[in-house]
Amino acid sequence: MSRVMEPLAIVGVVGEVVDMFTPTVKMIVTYNSDKQVVNGYEFMPSVIASRPRVEIGGEDMRNVYTLIMTDPDAPSPSDPYLREHLHWMVIDIPGTTDVSFGKEIVSYETPKPVAGIHRFVFILFKQRGRQTVRQPASRDCFNTKRFSGENGLGLPVAAVHFNAQRETAARKR
Amino acid sequence: MGMQKMGSQGDGSSHHKQPQFQPLVRENSMYSLTLDEVQNQLGDLGKPLSSMNLDELLKNVWTVEANRNMGLEVEGTPFANQTALQRQASISASSALSKKTVDEVWKDIQQSKHDGEMKSRERQPTLGEMTLEDFLVKAGVVTEAPVDKKDGGSIVGVDTYTAQQFPQQSQWVQYPPHPQYQHPQQSMMGVYMPGQPMPQPLRMGAASMMEVSYPENQVTLPPPLTGTLSETQTPARKRGVPEGVIEKTVERRQKRMIKNRESAARSRERKQAYTNELESKVSRLEEENKEAKETKGEDLFSFTPLVQSFYWIY
């Protein structure tokens, strides 16, 4: 496994949310214009209240990508019976640009973890073509692997995750 | 000692911790000696055992045990002291019982036996032949775990959870062999020790594992993690706690343990993942830095021809 993939595998993102993959496209997620998302970092809920900036690589503007943000620890990591909770989905993002150039088919929902420390995962897929991705039925009980299969997205080309918990719980630490 | 209780991994399934009470019942523990033998061990105390009150008896036993343990293992030393202190703190809380002399307690035991509730196998013809453990159990100082509930797998890794509070110590805590199982827990509990009374040995539900296990530590003798202490800690029970209640409590406790263990594992994963990420980042940055320096070197050289050509013009 490449060194880059280790953190994702250790916390079970690779495994529970996506299958093992090789990252081929650069993706940089930044909250508040200065807080870059780094695997395993914990953010305060206030920081992640609004959608982040997401810049992607890829060699060609003609390729389009789908970004998914999901929470596999809904409603709580010890009993995630609502896994996954879909927070955000943007499709048709042209390569080498950022999400503002794509189409937001599921609006950004502010993470509000009630119980436990949740993982929040950003996953980038390369689409087969424009407008090949359909809006999912609901946010609850979302399944990234299944969604990818249904929309011909294949394996991810990039992924990153962070942690967050309830504000009051986070401040006590 | 013949029992390896601590050789286990940090995560999940491979935990094999034996119940707290086992080491005390087995080798090297004074509790398995008969009262006659205990008296010998205690040496010249100036008083025969039977006229000591329980407080004194227990203190003496612990002091002797602590001294023995200190001699056995260097690592155990601070904790043996802690253990002794803890026990003293806890047992003296049950003041009603502790002021009774051994003799009086023995009479009580015999009296209650006459009520026909004791099983025949536990009948002791004389006080001196009874083991210290049995005596204390019958006296109501501690309660005894039912034999069939001893299960190394189910009563697992309490100190793992506590160890999570002290991650840098956790490795140490889990691996060194101890004659007494309690030591690692004591070390974890060390911070939480002072002032906590003996009661509430079973605070399930809201209580964290730390809180549940800690009072059990205080109840030095085989505190049944199996939940016979479901009401209060003082009266000894062979009767009165219905089987169903005991089992539910056991189940709840086990579930709590499992949940805690998983939570601890997730916590370790988070930590490890972040560490890995940072290490990668550092190494990438070091590479970049190295390259930047080299690149800078080249640029310096490339400037000189220009400078020379200026001079030439002048």
Image: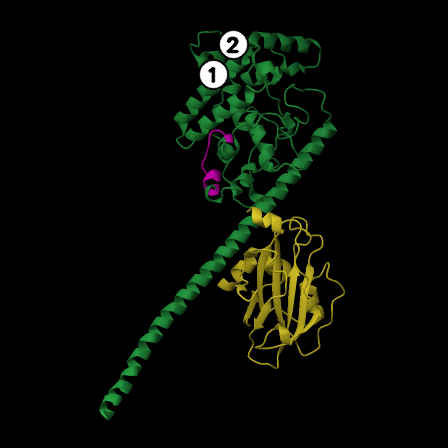
Which residue is at 53% across, 65% downward? A34
Residue B174 among magenta residues? yes
Residue under numbered circle 1: B60
Instruction: Tell me if I can see residue B5 in this picture.
Output: no
Check contact, mark 1 vs mark 2: CB within 8 A.
yes
Please, what secondary structure does the residue beneath circle 1 have? helix
Which residue is at 39% across, 65% downward? B286
What residue type is disc 2 on? Met
Colour of chain B in the rendered structure image: green
Count all numbered tags in the image, as a single digit.
2
Which chain is home to disc 2?
A: B
Mark 1 vs mark 2: tell me if same chain.
yes
Q: Is residue A3 above or below residue A62?
A: above
Return the x and y of residue B210 as percentages of the image width and height: 57, 36
Colour yellow maps to chain: A
Residue with the most extreme front position: B314
Residue stretch in magenta: B170-182
What residue type is disc 1 on? Asn
Residue under numbered circle 2: B52
